[in-house]
Amino acid sequence: MAATIYQVAALAGVSPATVSRVLNGGSVSPAYADRVREAAATLDFRPNRTARSLRRRSSQVIALIIPDIENPFFTALARGVEDRAEAAGLSVVLCNTDEQQVKEARYLDVAMSEHMSGVVLAPASAATDLDELLARRTPVVIVDRSSRYDVDTVLMDNENGGRRATAILYEQGFTRVACITGPRDVQTAAERAAGWREVFTGRNRRVNPDNYIRYSDYRVDGGRAAMADLLSMRHAPDAVFVANNLMSVGAFQHLLEVGRRPPAVGLASLGDLPFHTWEAEGVTVLPWPARRLGLQAAELLLARINGDDSPARLVVTDSTSADDGPATTVAHLPAQG
């Protein structure tokens, strides 16, 4: 009887996914690669090319479905996915949902109809439906926002990012720091606002934090409108934490328009400002390593495509380290009841 990949993995002392990566030219340490090749030779293992073709789907293409390609954060994330996929011999089809569930559903249908190898998805909403895709055993990795599904997920430490940005403004001497965050029903917006709220309530115990938060649309115009609204308050904030880069651009635009550019009003942006020609002196910018998020998501997807059947994993990426640095936390997700 022919040897199986599981027997090779057992003899080599590695996982079946590692055996698959070695045999398919994936990234594996030289020591592990040598052990796998030696075990395969000992067992006279010959890969089942037909099964490999089915597992990879015949297309050799993966889908990357994101909410907003105009946002440089998602552009950098896409670059990370594409770099890793290209190194593994896969092509990437980029799909932009504009945060619309209908568009997202259409792209998921395309991924199924074209028998794509897998999908990396930043969900448009909490109602994202992956039932049919998962029923077909198509590998899926969720990125940037979590979902209700028991699949691999790669997230940023959003709450800590909001906490850090707000604390920096207080350390600069500002006394009442407001928050502009994304839509109420978007997880990243809620988590970043939670970090802000923790610091705000610790510094302003007699002030209702709900009066100093504005929910917007993660777009430039939304940031501009939210900043105008905050500054119109009777007891206006003297600084504002903005929960993404595009809204930060809009908020900064409004400060320039009314002659209150930082540090007249403090401003902290979560994520690099996308328009580098602007003179944004005085703006606190916390880099948000989106490319690393994409690399990690693609790495998990490739492992699934190559046969990894371990429990779903949650990777939480440390926003304080370099864009190509390691993740802070890797854990198995609990089974869904």
Image (cartoon, grey):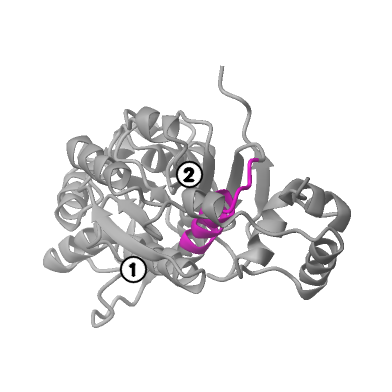
Question: Helix or strand or loop: what does disc 2 sit on?
Answer: loop
Q: Going from the N terminus, do you reach mark 2 or mark 1 first?
A: 2
The quadrant in which the C terminus is found is top right
Residue located beneath label 2 in the image: 139
**Whole-percent x and y of residue 278?**
24, 79
Q: Amino acid at mark 2?
A: Pro
Q: Residue at left 47%, top 37%?
A: 137
**Whole-percent x and y of residue 100?**
20, 40
Q: Is residue 137 left or right of residue 325?
A: left
Q: Amino acid at mark 1?
A: Pro
Q: What stretch of residues is rendered in magenta?
A: 294-309
Identity of the residue furthest to the front in this view: 1
Identity of the residue furthest to the top in this view: 337
* Residue in front for this viewpoint, 169 or 273: 273
* Residue in front for this viewpoint, 164 or 48: 48
Q: Is residue 139 left or right of residue 261?
A: right
Is any part of residue 167 visible from this angle?
A: no
**Whole-percent x and y of residue 51?**
55, 49
Q: Is residue 311 left or right of residue 239?
A: right
Residue located beneath label 1 in the image: 263
What type of secondary structure mainly makes up the magenta span?
A: helix
Q: Is residue 57 above or below residue 311?
A: below
* Residue in front for this viewpoint, 85 or 232: 85
Q: Marks 2 and 1, Cα distance to the nearest angstrom?
A: 48 Å
Q: Residue at left 30%, top 68%?
A: 262
Q: Is residue 302 left or right of residue 326?
A: left
Question: Helix or strand or loop: what does disc 1 sit on?
Answer: loop
Q: Residue at left 48%, top 65%?
A: 289
**Whole-percent x and y of residue 180?**
30, 47
